[in-house]
Image (tube, grey):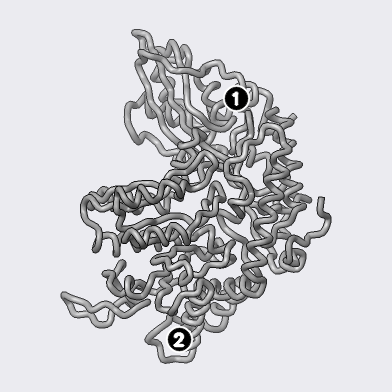
Amino acid sequence: MDDLYREVIIDRYQNPRFRGELDPHDYSYEDDNPVCGDHIRIDLRVDDKDVVTEAQFSGQGCSISQASADLLMEKITGMPIAEVRKLGKQDILDLLGIELGPVRLKCALLSLKVLKGGVYGLDEVVTLDELAAS
Amino acid sequence: MATSPQVGTLDVGRIRKDFPVLDVEVHPGVKLVYLDSGATSQKPLQVIEAMDTYYRRQNSNIHRGVHTLAEHATLAYENARVKVAKFINAAKPREIIFTRNATEAINLVAYSWGRANLKAGDVVLLTEMEHHANLVPWQMLASEKGIRLEFIPVTEGFLLDLAALPALLEQFKPRLVAFTAMSNVLGTITPAAEIIRQAHAAGALTLIDGAQSVPHLATDVQALDVDFLAFSSHKMLGPTGLGVLYGKQALLEAMPPFLGGGDMIKRVQLRSFVPNALPQKFEAGTPAIAEVIGLGAAVDYLNAVGMDAIAAHDHELTAYALERLEEVPGIWIFGPSAEHKSSNATFTFAGAHPHDVAEILNRYGVATRAGHHCAMPVHEKFGIPATTRASFYLYNTREEIDQLIEALYKVKEIFG
């Protein structure tokens, strides 16, 4: 079995479960990885207790960025926003279950960067370089 | 399929011996197949050794020094300028300005010539296939001075729409037509001489972004009658950190200085300065001396091999690559047919993102580039966010393209 292109990654890339846009939404944020042109938008709906009820992503990118976005949407569904804010690099790597070099690490972390931008409601919460080095 | 490394009239086997990096194993037992010369070329020993000799035996700052090393270094630096001038057939060495890269060369023209000569409403005519280096400096000038940008369209066949040029010149009366002579993504060779002829007839000056064309095609600025030409050392076997601006002497003399500081002045008082003569007027501060000397060695190397032979080799490899790529199911080629292009093959792979393609190719040692290649608008026009580009130079062989094709079948196995 391929180390990088594990079945789960190819499957999530080719058959994403959480691809789409939510309108209306409670949170929405989008961003690019200027190095490769990948683009991800994330829309969230939350209930009155600030727990994520629905999460969807849209945009385009490589298998690593798209699969990590899909897995991340699954993980945060049902999660309080306070917990979402605490997610870090290691959570993404655990979801993917692979080792990544410095370049592909940024592919994997783009969805987390977008998510954090959305839930913190700020423009420059964290850069991809900072996330990768965290 | 050819079994000999001989392509065209080049002895590629012999050439490859001059490029030590081509022997590197990128993974244990997997030798480098370098198909990324469009991003930067590899360097022959002759260039590496010229720079090494400078640092070992000549290192000194140039100009003004009277000691022996300063004289040697100045001579070597200025000799390289003469070599570069001859390489593009400039009338005089003083028309060669050394910059940090091709990007800075274009910025120099936008900043110095553009700010002094353009006013709100003036039009700069570009093309839809430009690299960001020949877009953003003009966009910055548009924000600052209110100039307008117009574009020669790219046809569905990935060529410059020359038929649209007369009407654009007539309608907008541009002050400058700035265009690439060879697209870094499509590989398209644009009809530079014809564009320049029409632009001059309409009263416009012309600038060529030659970052891709100068390494691959013989360039004669006097025959072209181009006003400005920007190109880059590191894409033509020379070192990084160095670009070249060619400008016609009268134009350069009339332009205000770009960066201020040492070397670019004749005389300085506390509140004023008198700029130096060309070319020092545009070379403020200590330049990239070792790199300029390295570029001189690169020019010697290219001349020794012969630019016509290199052009023929690059074109033949490009044609072969396109032909072989068409055999692979799912490949879509982003660029015109071989007769209109050279030096690269850019493509998409159905079902596999360019980053994933490049990642898998790398496992087989094949170095390509994935992304928008600093030319987002031309990708957007055709509705594709990113592509994979294989680019070729004098040291590449047909066997290496065969290795690219084999590796692409592995991509198909994973993403198929």
Q: Is residue B170 left or right of residue A108?
A: left
Residue positioned 59% across, 46% down in the render:
B369
- The residue identified by callout 2 is B70
Tell me where residue B320 appears, x and y as whole percent. 71, 50
- Chain of the residue under the numbered disc 2 shown in the image: B
- The residue identified by callout 1 is A13
Q: Is residue A91 visible?
A: yes
Above or below, A132 relative to B119: above
Q: Is residue B356 visible?
A: no
Q: How many marks?
A: 2
User: For this rendering, which residue is in front, B109 or B52?
Assistant: B109
Tags 2 and 1 touching, CB below 8 Å: no
Residue A84: give its label.
none
Above or below, B154 relative to A56: below
Residue positioned 70% across, 41% down in the render:
B325
Q: From this viewpoint, which residue is outermost toward the left?
A: B271
Residue positioned 46% across, 26% down in the render:
A87
Q: Quadrant of residue A108?
A: top right
Residue positioned 30% across, 60% down in the render:
B111
Q: Nearer the viewer, mark 2 or mark 1?
A: 1
Q: Is residue A29 left or right of residue B119?
A: right
Question: Disc 2 residue type?
Answer: Ala
Question: Disc 1 residue type?
Answer: Tyr
Tell me where residue A92 appears, x and y as whole percent. 54, 28
User: For this rendering, which residue is in front, B406 or B169?
Assistant: B169
Above or below, B86 relative to B149: below
Tell me where residue B202 appears, x and y as whole percent. 33, 58
Secondary element under disc 2, as helix, strand or loop, is helix
